[in-house]
Image (cartoon, rainbow, N blue to C red):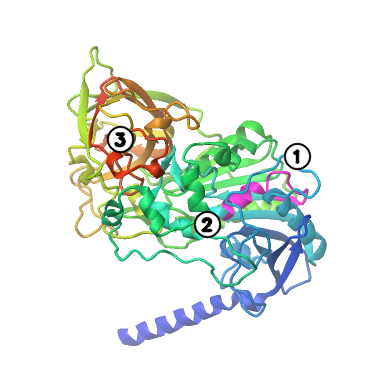
């Protein structure tokens, strides 16, 4: 057979298989659209996909979403339903719901609606809406087995977490994935610093609709360029962004009116409410999730500390939601991690979790570890009975003169200094593009930053043996500034050997030899160094401690590599510019407030790693 004919047949067979996949849901499921009435009379639009085979009973897998149950119409079907195709083909009852105030549901939307612990009368929150919905589903859907599971990624992950509060007795299992935990630490802020890179997402969450709709009622602002660095630099102070979002964008107004961690933000956080949880929980996250890294780790930890329920965690080498996709090669930006990692997770972990608690009794072992963690340096999965693992210890490295990262403290301390200029901020990425939300930068090459005079670099010698980090990282900086305000950014970097081979994914202008892979990074808005609710200025030229918690990692720095730490004060336009002159509200800062300042990092600054013992 000629090769060209073979190619044609292969393509035709692939097209036929894809066509079969596209009609699988329609061929095997019946779709029903309905409204479920909440205790206060508000009706929520709900879509039910029930197996056509009614000879047995099935669990209900339920997702609540602010992003729409599309496609609308009982004759319109999704090509895939459920958490993954394995659970879809095993025939579960799959339910989607537009949350209150979104899309085809009634009511008023509230971003991360505050939980009401002791509701009276017709008081409602997302917990009561979930409870009322599950109650209706188990009583009205034929052939259900009385067991319900919830799941969701990102904002739907937040609603999955919310289902655990005042949980309905039928709720047996929940998998919050990339779940938002608190908007002051996830998505729109990091330690109080506003994520300017997330500004365009304000369009999705800011506008209120007046009635149920199947069409989008918001649109993204037209910016006229793909160069996000230059666009935001030219805009100047945040107040100039009012040109794009007016008073009708409710969330934009809320962001500006609440620059500190006040009751508005505190009430919307969900982590503090995760106590005495009853359903089984599997928290899933990406080790390189640029949007929701705080939420999954904090959700797992909060449940682990205060609940006696099945609670497990899965973290892979994924960006936001990668585990729900089926790419053969798993890579983030330039860095390749392995083949079929998402497929294996869906088949061998996620499906096993839901089947155990929804199709079986839920008794006995699931066969899953407490913590299933991918080592992003050695490129392999590891199983642990707890997280962080038992055999870990804290190891301190000091940020010393001569660009040294040293495990031994010096007897006398000097300092490193740099000039931070708001007119020439350090980019977070070399890529010239306008992104809706940033992702790739989480593993990006940091050589461009290491070569700037306003970025301090501290580095170990070439490692003579592997060092595995398994847990959080704590940077304890001792700093001073000529100004009264500053941001502090710490990045932990894996420096590859000079002869490291390229991957298929490596950008053309790069080489993996000496690649500076960012492993973890975080910012602290200096005004919040002591209290996120009560900001305070720096005393100019005064040595001051600033502590930054970097979220957990599971990464082996291999023999022949180096560990590097970078410290800087701008990270643009990932976060907004700090004026470096203290103002009560940075959203109201004037052009004249933005001043060039000199920052010092003293050599008794340190970074604490959670190291896995051999």
Q: Which quadrant does the C terminus fall into?
A: top left
| Cα distance in 3D space between marks 2 and 3 | 30 Å
Image coordinates of residue 436 in percent, x first then y, are 40, 59
Residue shown at 63% from the left, 77% from the top: 26
Give the labeled residue for mark 2. Answer: 205
Q: Label 1: which residue?
A: 118
The question of residue 167 being in magenta is answered with yes
Q: Earlier in the sequence, mark 1 or mark 3?
A: 1
Count residues near mark 1 (Cα–Cα under 10 Å), then give few for <14, some for 14-19, many for 20+.
Answer: few
Query: Mark 1 or mark 2, which has the lower sequence index?
Result: 1
Q: From what the image shows, is residue 280 above or below residue 227?
A: above
Q: Quadrant of the N terminus?
A: bottom left
Residue 304 in sight in this render: yes
Q: Is residue 344 left or right of residue 166?
A: left
Q: Which residues are magenta?
A: 156-172
Is the Cβ of the residue at disc 1 closer than 8 Å to that at disc 3?
Answer: no
User: Residue 406: percent from the left, percent from the top?
Assistant: 26, 24
**Which residue occupies the foreground of this view, 236 or 467?**
236
Residue 451: name its quadrant.
Answer: top left
**613 magenta-colored:** no
Q: Is residue 408 left or right of residue 384?
A: left
The residue labelled by disc 3 is 580
């Amino acid at each position: 057979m000629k090769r060209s004919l073979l190619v044609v047949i292969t393509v035709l067979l692939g097209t036929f298989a894809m066509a079969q996949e596209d009609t699988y849901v329609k061929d095997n499921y019946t779709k029903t659209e309905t409204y479920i009435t909440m205790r206060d009379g508000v009706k929520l639009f709900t879509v039910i996909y029930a197996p056509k085979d009614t000879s047995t009973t099935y669990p209900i897998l339920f997702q609540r979403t602010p992003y729409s149950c599309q496609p609308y119409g009982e004759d319109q079907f999704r090509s895939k339903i459920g958490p993954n195709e394995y659970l879809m083909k095993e025939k579960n009852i799959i339910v989607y719901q537009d949350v209150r105030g979104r899309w085809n549901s009634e009511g008023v939307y509230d971003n991360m609606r505050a939980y009401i612990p002791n509701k009276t009368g017709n008081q409602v929150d997302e917990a009561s809406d979930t409870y009322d919905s599950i109650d209706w589903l188990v009583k009205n859907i034929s052939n259900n087995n009385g067991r319900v599971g919830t799941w969701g990624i990102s904002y739907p992950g937040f609603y999955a977490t919310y289902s655990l509060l005042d949980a309905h007795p039928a709720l047996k299992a929940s998998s919050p994935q990339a779940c938002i935990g608190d908007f002051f630490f996830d998505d729109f802020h990091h330690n109080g610093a506003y994520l300017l890179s997330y500004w365009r997402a304000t369009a999705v969450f800011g506008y209120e609709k007046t009635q149920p709709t199947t069409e989008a009622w918001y649109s993204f602002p037209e910016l006229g360029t793909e160069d996000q660095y230059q666009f935001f630099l030219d805009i100047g102070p945040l107040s100039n962004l009012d040109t794009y979002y007016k008073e009708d964008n409710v969330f934009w107004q809320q962001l500006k009116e609440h620059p500190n961690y006040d009751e508005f933000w505190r009430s919307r956080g969900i982590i503090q409410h995760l106590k005495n949880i009853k359903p089984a929980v599997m928290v899933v996250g990406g080790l390189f999730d640029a949007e929701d890294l705080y939420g999954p780790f904090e959700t797992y930890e909060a449940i682990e500390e205060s609940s006696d329920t099945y609670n497990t965690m899965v973290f892979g080498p994924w960006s936001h939601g990668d585990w729900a996709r089926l790419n053969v090669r798993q890579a983030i930006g330039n860095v390749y991690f392995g083949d079929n990692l998402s497929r294996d997770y869906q088949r061998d972990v996620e499906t096993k979790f839901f089947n155990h608690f929804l199709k079986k009794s839920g008794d006995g072992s699931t066969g899953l570890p407490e913590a299933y963690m991918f080592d992003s340096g050695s490129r392999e999965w590891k199983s642990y009975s707890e997280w962080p693992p038992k055999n870990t210890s804290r190891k301190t490295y000091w940020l010393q003169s001569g660009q040294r990262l040293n495990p031994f403290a010096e007897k006398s301390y000097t300092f490193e200094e740099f000039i931070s200029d708001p007119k020439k901020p350090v980019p977070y990425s070399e890529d010239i593009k306008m992104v809706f939300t940033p992702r790739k930068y989480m593993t990006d090459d940091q050589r461009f930053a290491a070569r700037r005079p306003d970025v301090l670099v501290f580095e170990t010698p070439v490692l003579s043996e592997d060092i595995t980090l398994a847990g959080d990282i704590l940077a304890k900086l001792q700093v001073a500034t000529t100004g009264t305000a500053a941001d502090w950014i710490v990045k932990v970097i894996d420096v590859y050997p000079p002869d490291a081979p390229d991957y298929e994914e490596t950008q053309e202008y790069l080489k993996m030899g000496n690649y500076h892979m960012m492993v973890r990074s975080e910012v602290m808005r200096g005004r919040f160094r002591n209290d996120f609710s009560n900001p305070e200025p720096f005393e100019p030229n005064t040595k001051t401690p600033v502590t930054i918690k970097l979220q957990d990692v599971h990464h082996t720095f291999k023999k022949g590599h180096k560990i590097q730490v970078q410290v800087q004060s701008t990270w643009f336009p990932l976060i907004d510019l700090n004026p470096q002159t203290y103002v009560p509200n940075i959203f109201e800062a004037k052009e004249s407030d933005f001043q060039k300042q000199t920052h010092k990092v003293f050599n008794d600054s340190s970074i604490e790693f959670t190291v896995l013992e051999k």
